[in-house]
Image (cartoon, rainbow, N blue to C red):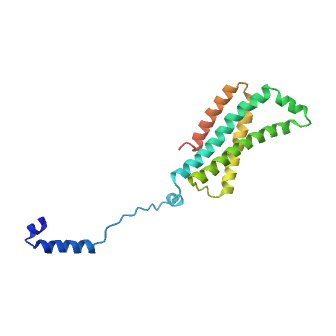
Amino acid sequence: AALAAATDADPAEVAGALDTAHADVIPATLAVQDTGEIAQEFSGVSGFDVLAVTTVLLFTFLNTLTSGTGTLIQVRRQGVLRRTMAAPVTAGQALLGHALGRLTVGLFQAVYIVVATRLIFGVDWGALALVALVLMVFALVAVGWTMILGMLLDNEGAAVGLSVVLGLVLGALGGTMM
């Protein structure tokens, strides 16, 4: 009505012209596409996928480290290591047995997190062989630190505290706290 009054045109004619214009004009659309190489590589990755990866690495390292150091101190304190050495095994076999126990616990936790996030949240882990390789390396590093701290320290509280600090600092430096 205001347009018709401003142009001295018939209001019915203005309304018809506006209806025709609305029918003929294609609405504008806006599509934002990042053409950067890194953006293209990670185009299908959600924030939760990234969070799941960093979480499994941090938890594998931290849980293996904190649970293992206290256990190794208890093994030494309670004489389990002496009794193990009384059996027909070498010192290397005894240490390897303890290390494999820690490795098994760490890998079980990692596999549990991978399977649970896949089933519950639909996280796409990509090439599972590479995921297994990375988790194995992280678990082996955690077991190595566990063995070192468990043999050097005599106090469980100090060992667990140092394990937490070491795990969090190394996790932050490694990018697991995004």
Q: How many marks?
A: 0
Residue at 75% x, 31% y is 72
- Nearest the viewer among 14 and 28 is 14
Spot occupied by residue 172 in the image (x, y as percentages of width and height): 57, 40
* In the image, residue 122 above or below residue 159: below
- Nearest the viewer among 105 and 35 is 105
Q: Residue furthest right?
A: 88
Residue at 25% x, 71% y is 22
Camera sees residue 151: no
Residue at 65% x, 42% y is 60
Residue at 41% x, 61% y is 32
- Nearest the viewer among 40 and 63 is 63
Q: Left or right: where does residue 5 sit relative to residue 98? A: left
Residue 18 placement: quadrant: bottom left
Spot occupied by residue 134 in the image (x, y as percentages of width and height): 67, 50
Image quarter where the N terminus lies is bottom left
Residue 88 placement: quadrant: top right
* In the image, residue 176 above or below residue 29: above
Camera sees residue 159: yes
* In the image, residue 160 above or below residue 51: above
Residue 99 placement: quadrant: top right
Spot occupied by residue 149 in the image (x, y as percentages of width and height): 71, 32
